[in-house]
Image: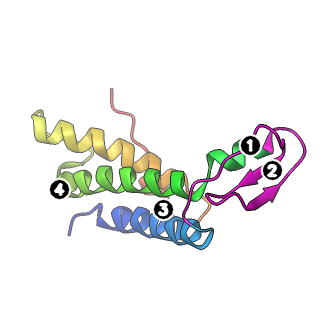
Amino acid sequence: MTDNSDMIDFVRARLAEEEQIALAAGGESWRCPADVPGEIHDRVGAIAFSVRNRGYDQHIAFQDPAHTRRRIETSRVLLNEYAEVADKDVDRPEHDFASGRAVGLGFAVRQMAAEHAGHPDYRAKWLPRFIH
């Protein structure tokens, strides 16, 4: 395990939680039919939500369970790539490709972790590093 394995585990756990929420919401795509503004429909046309103000319908439909699950899957790909080189993501990295890859992927994973900075298991040491 690397020194960054706790951060990887933290992000994996948040993604798993989010995936469970998306699955509980049906796991499918939602849409906003043009003829009924404010309604968000699921795949079979049933009304999933009805909101009538400030564009919430478009925002909710965009964050549908299927979209969320696709985003989670791409996040997992990035996280797995980082896990392969996380031991090279250190404060004073070497000046080689593998170390540069680790620091770059590490920055992205730290950003992913920072999305959950309010979670009680989040650690300040995971804040993104800014290297000049």
How crowded is the residue under tag 1: few (<14 C-alpha within 10 Å), some, or many (20+)? few
Across and down, in percent, residue 110 comes to 41, 49
Question: Does the segment drawn in magenta span residue 40?
Answer: yes
Cβ–Cβ below 8 Å for labels 1 and 4? no
Instruction: Write the residue at 26% across / 41% down.
Output: 103
Question: Which sits earlier in the primary sequence, circle 2 or circle 3?
Answer: 2
Question: Which sits earlier in the primary sequence, circle 3 or circle 1?
Answer: 1
Cβ–Cβ below 8 Å for labels 2 and 4? no
Q: Which residue is mark 3?
A: 123
How crowded is the residue under tag 4: few (<14 C-alpha within 10 Å), some, or many (20+)? few
The residue mark sitting in front, 3 or 1, is 1
The region drawn magenta spans 27-56
Across and down, in percent, residue 43 comes to 61, 57
Q: Which residue is mark 2?
A: 39
- In front: 30, or 125? 30
Q: Which residue is mark 4?
A: 84
